[in-house]
């Protein structure tokens, strides 16, 4: 089953699934949703509440089959933010490329680049600086 995972809550307790989840949620039904989710172990390592995972687990515990969110059907949920291949200039004038793109290009922290501006095409080129270049 997709929800049988090794993730643990910040408190060290396992995320409840199935009948154990339903029983715990039912016993806390007079409490706010956030408290129920926390008590059932749906807290990430940073302490953030994992509401989507909690609700998905409740639905599956009730016996409903929840289709996967990925187009291939292989994943068990969201993959987070996806690269859009667009960006914008921030208020401070910076232009952020982002981790998704540097990872795709195989770039490493500390790697240096020469910035070339091509006004006629409106392009900005990044050319790697070889370690022996000044």
Image (cartoon, grey):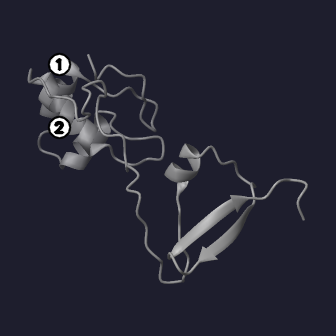
Q: Please tell me in which quadrant of the rendered image residue 6 appears.
A: top left
Identify whether 40 is placed above or below 49.
above
Q: CA distance from mark 2 to mark 1?
A: 14 Å
Residue 71 placement (x, y as % from top left): 24, 33
Q: Between residues 54 and 73, which one lies in front from this camera angle?
A: 73
Task: Give x and y (percent) for residue 109.
Answer: 71, 52
- Residue at the image position 9 percent from the left and 20 percent from the top: 63
**Between residues 81 and 13, which one lies in front from this camera angle?**
81
Q: Quadrant of the N terminus?
A: top left
Which label sits on residue 32? none
**Residue lying at 50% horizontally and 75% vertically, measured from the top left:** 121
Nearest-to-viewer mark from 2 and 1: 1
Residue 28 numbered tag = 2
Q: Would you say 104 lies left or right of 117 here?
A: left
Left or right side of 10 for 134: right
What residue is rendered at 31% in x and 41% in y?
38
Q: Residues within 10 Å of mark 2 (few under 14, many from 20)?
A: some
User: Where on the picture, by quarter, is residue 134?
Assistant: bottom right
| Residue that label 1 marks | 19
Above or below, 1 against 25 in this view is: above
| Total count of labels | 2
Q: Is disc 2 placed on a helix, strand or loop? A: loop
**Residue 89's x, y, as percent?**
47, 77
Q: Residue furthest front?
A: 120
Q: Which residue occupies the extreme top position in the image?
A: 1
Q: Position of residue 25 (x, y in %)?
A: 17, 33
The image quadrant that residue 85 belongs to is bottom left
Question: Relative to 57, is 134 above or below?
Answer: below
SS for callout 1: helix
Q: Nearer the viewer, residue 99 or 133?
A: 133
The disc, 2 or 1, on the residue closer to the chain's N-terminal end is 1
Residue shown at the point (34%, 34%) measured from the top left: 41
């Amino acid at each position: 089953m997709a929800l049988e995972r090794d993730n643990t809550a910040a408190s060290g307790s396992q995320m409840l699934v199935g009948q154990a989840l339903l029983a715990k949620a039912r016993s806390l039904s007079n409490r706010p949703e956030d408290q129920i989710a926390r008590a059932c172990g749906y807290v990430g390592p940073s302490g953030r509440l994992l509401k989507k995972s909690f609700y998905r687990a409740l639905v599956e515990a009730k016996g409903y089959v929840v289709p996967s969110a990925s187009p291939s059907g292989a994943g068990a949920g969201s993959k987070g933010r996806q690269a859009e291949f667009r960006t914008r200039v921030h208020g401070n004038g910076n232009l952020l490329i982002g981790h998704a793109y540097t990872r795709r290009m195989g770039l490493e922290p500390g790697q240096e680049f020469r910035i070339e501006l091509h006004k006629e095409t409106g392009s900005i080129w990044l050319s790697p600086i070889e370690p022996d270049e000044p």
